[in-house]
Amino acid sequence: MKNGEKVFVIGIDGATFDIIGPWLEQGKLPHLKSLIDNGCSGILESSVPPISPVAWPSFFTGVNPGKHGIFDFIEKSKTDQSIRFMNRTNCKAQPIWGYLNQAGYTTTIINIPGTYPPDKIDGFMISGLDTPSTDSEFTHPSEFKNELKAAVGNYIIDLEHNPVLMNNPRKYLEHMVDMVGMREKTAHYLMTKYPVDFFMVVFTATDRVQHSFWRYQDKEHPGYSPGLEDAIYTVYKRVDDAIGRLLDNLDESASVVVMSDHGMYGVYKSVDVNRWLLENGFLVLKKESPVLKIKDFYKRAKRKYLKKAEKILFDHYIDWSKTRAYFLGSWGNIFINVKGKEPYGIVNPGKEYESIREEIIRKLSPLTDPENGKPVIKTILKKEDIFTGDYFDKAPDLVIMWNEKYNSIKTLYEKLRSGGRHGVIQPYKQLCGDHAPNGIFVYKSPHVKKGMTNMKAKIIDLLPTILYTMDVAVPNSIDGRILNEIFTEEFLSKKSAKFDNNMYMFETEEASVYSDEDSQKIAERLTDLGYFD
């Protein structure tokens, strides 16, 4: 450890002032309220798209997805049409713990999504959502896994595939609360036994409970059901209690940052984008194409044929000789089938490409809910308006941003041939809550102005701000900025920002870190969490 600044970061996945604001005013989240009162706080704008596999890497690298290379949970191979899940090796930008370790600071990282396999850092790392199971090598040092089990018991990575829990909301809620307790216990153990300069822990149960229990507290929701109105608060209160106890381990001189990767809103209906593309002639299926959901592919495929099954997903379903555009992923990403970029591309770059994008925007943007006439889509963004960097070519060509109460159907091809029971706009699926672009941040430090509550920042701004606080040079290559406005004039005058012109990349090959069994576990978890239907 160095004798310099200490920073403690608390991630509250999916936290939004829309939900916690009234509880803060009522004193129901006292520890979070104390941090806000003694620091500054505001809205934290998420990544585009505002989903965890994109937002968390954007936070810990300080760059847009065009520079770190991750645009969703999954991506399609540009050579053989197979689908693969993203992991730490796919993120190509230097993370905050890399900069801090280079500067001589020690770090501990717990449960940040997108950190499997864990980096070999100067300190400790326990990977998050993308970890297949506790049988995996999910800790650094690797031998710490045994010590962790001895110290805290059976560690919980995330909500696992468990039909009994999934069909029993109260038991499911109890499991979420238990997960918070396990995270707190783990953080407390590492904080007290192995003190470091930079410590971060992420609580993901807040995201999970809002995804699954929003309809219980929203009386206007079409799936409203009384009896579990306090489910979301129960989890937030448990996180607040954990924050209070963990803060007891810190010296008053330490800086405390609370942040979320995105916000949340209620989902009333879901949009089948691929069906819209099909009905409007942009996507064409082969005759007699079967349709399977993503989890079913992994379930039905024998292990030795799994990779082949992944490839069949696209090769055998879509008539690529006639398809101009397709939707893929868990948010709103549309890809154009461009020659020279896609294996079976038919769209010419340049004028034809631009014409198709404009046609999709023109026809899809006005989409309205037939029941109430309300617009479903807030805007459709072109890739060049969002992304820059070495991985720009991997980016979706268009990104849909949804209006509140709507999201996308997250199956790969939801019974497109049969027409299904519903049209393009359908009743909400598993998720009754989904991601909003605005999360939260709180920055409590001896160096910040107290009581400022209307701050605005981007998720990529936290990395350079933390580096500045810890007197570490900020790379000029990152996209975020130092939030100078939160600091006192005295602190700003004493500490000049340092900048580094070097380009730091995360040096690793994109390893096939997931076995067939691992891919099955990841598919089941993401499906159970509602990220795929």
Image (cartoon, helix red, strand yellow):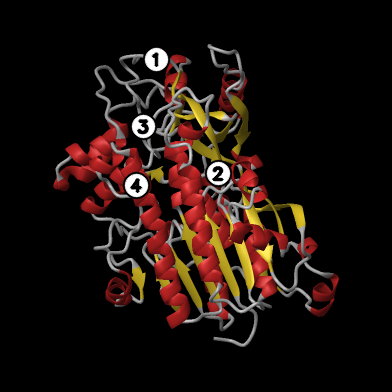
Of residues 480 and 195, the one drawn nearer to the viewer in this rendering = 195
- Label 2, label 4: how far apart the Cα atoms are: 20 Å
**Residue for point 30% across, 57% down:** 512
Of residues 503 and 140, the one drawn nearer to the viewer in this rendering = 140
The residue labelled by disc 3 is 412
Quick one: label 2 or label 1, which is nearer the N terminus? Answer: 2
Q: Amino acid at mark 1?
A: His
- Label 3, label 2: how far apart the Cα atoms are: 19 Å
The residue labelled by disc 4 is 84
The residue labelled by disc 1 is 422
Where disc 1 sits, the SS reads: loop
Other-residue count near label 4 (Cα within 10 Å), few / some / many at <14 / 14–19 / ≥20: some
The residue labelled by disc 2 is 50
Residue 92 in sight from this viewpoint: no
Q: Residues at badges 3 and 4 in contact (C-beta under 8 Å)?
A: no
Q: Would residue 36 appear left or right of 224 to someone viewing this image?
A: right
Other-residue count near label 1 (Cα within 10 Å), few / some / many at <14 / 14–19 / ≥20: few
Q: Amino acid at mark 3?
A: Leu
- Locate residue 318: give its quadrant: top left
